[in-house]
Image (cartoon, coloured by chain):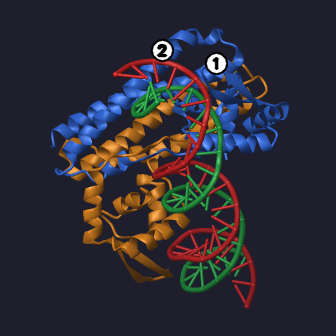
Chain colours: A orange, B blue, C green, D red
Amino acid sequence: MALSHAIMTALLEDDMSGYELAKAFDISLGLFWRASHQQIYQELHKLADRGWLQCETVAQAGKPDKIVYALTQAGRDAMAEWVLGNSRVQEGKDDLYVKLYNLSEANAAHLAVEIGQRREQMMQRLYLYEKIRRRHYADPDALPVRRKGVYLALLAGIRQGEHFLAWCDEAQAMLGDIG
Amino acid sequence: MALSHAIMTALLEDDMSGYELAKAFDISLGLFWRASHQQIYQELHKLADRGWLQCETVAQAGKPDKIVYALTQAGRDAMAEWVLGNSRVQEGKDDLYVKLYNLSEANAAHLAVEIGQRREQMMQRLYLYEKIRRRHYADPDALPVRRKGVYLALLAGIRQGEHFLAWCDEAQAMLGDIG
DNA sequence: TGGATTTATGCAATTTATTGCATATTTGAT
DNA sequence: ATCAAATATGCAATAAATTGCATAAATCCA
């Protein structure tokens, strides 16, 4: 299980509540890992039970209380060990490509629309990630070690996104000739 | 659930047994969907129960019998309808990127090795996909409609792979300066 | 004839992920 | 006052995926 590791990674620098984590997963780490808030809350309980996280209820002005989680030393040790193990790729699964195998005159127009929507979503994401990159990773070689890793991950996401946009254009051009 | 649709897509042109499907998922469709043979066999039962597939035991010379599955008309109809619905992206989940967020002097060398392994795997895949492309999709505009869709999916996979190789090189260069 | 390998299919337990609720606090608008 | 929306946390049922077996026919090699 690696959702736990994704969560602990998000907690490396900042302590966070489940709610904050859920939002963090939409942005920074979201390119590489998705998780619902239900999953996150459940995992947080498990990690706290295992002693890798500790939690504390924090009162807030103008908002309900929150439960803030922080990595314990045991948690940090577990992470350090995990990084040295072998990674597992969980290949992305995307209906869109499977649908393309079913291309016909009857659905070409629909698929062109779907691709257009995906393109739009990716544009918005890329805009966000590019902003982060320009703001915090403008000079990658000057970054401290850990941040260099974050930079590389970000770079992979951005490149992937850019390639996807170009592909969308090609695909739509080709689909346009059919529908 | 869309494993069912991936399976039925694989059966669009050729009837296949579970064993053959499992192998087909490693190649052609494998860029976009992964499934274990256990999952496939189970899904085949469900689809047959639902009337979307029909099966037939076929004796083979020099091999055990196999159970070959074929799309029924109901199955084809269900597929045609499904394509017109909204797609769901299941974002890829990859430990490697999460690990990069944990980069340190202690693990930079290990991560460089992991990236090298991934690069190698992707090279082999790309070699296969490029071969398919050159052999069967050399002139995309001349393809029949359905094959154009397959071409577009293949193209997406190849582009993604090529970008990944380039990223690996960059990442290894950066990691080399650390470890 | 015994043993490894490939082909071929499957069950069962467990872990992960999704879906659909349920609840409660606080702000701000009507 | 009430109602919507954002914040915040959670349970339970189901679906999907993974992991670890188990079986069996046929080939090939020693």
Chain for numbered disc 1: B
In space, the residues marked 2 and 1 are separated at their CA atoms by 30 Å
A90 versus B144 height, above or below:
below
B52 versus A28 height, above or below:
above
B117 versus A61 height, above or below:
above
Q: Residue at x 75, y 41 (%)?
A: B47
Horizontally, is B47 left or right of A80 in the view?
Answer: right
Q: Residue at x 76, y 35 (%)?
A: B79
Q: Which residue is mark 2?
A: B131
Q: Decide if residue A141 is in sight here.
A: yes
- First reached walking from the N terminus: tag 2 or tag 1: 1
Tell me which amino acid carries mark 1.
Ala
Image quarter hosting the C terminus of chain B: top left
D11 versus A178 height, above or below:
below
Q: Say what secondary structure mark 1 lies in.
A: loop
Tell me which amino acid carries mark 2.
Lys
* Displayed quadrant of residue B18: top right
Classed neighbour count for the residue bearing mark 2: other residues with Cα under 10 Å, few (<14), some (14–19), many (≥20)? few
Q: Position of residue B73 (x, y in %)?
A: 84, 30
Q: Residue at x 49, y 45 (%)?
A: A125
Question: Are labels 2 and 1 on one chain?
Answer: yes
Q: Which mark is residue B168?
A: none
Classed neighbour count for the residue bearing mark 1: other residues with Cα under 10 Å, few (<14), some (14–19), many (≥20)? few
Q: Position of residue A19 (x, y in %)?
A: 49, 69
Chain for numbered disc 2: B
How many numbered discs? Answer: 2
Q: Decide if residue A144 is in sight here.
A: no
B5 and C1: which is toward the camera? C1
Q: Which residue is mark 1?
A: B61
Q: Position of residue B107 (x, y in %)?
A: 21, 49
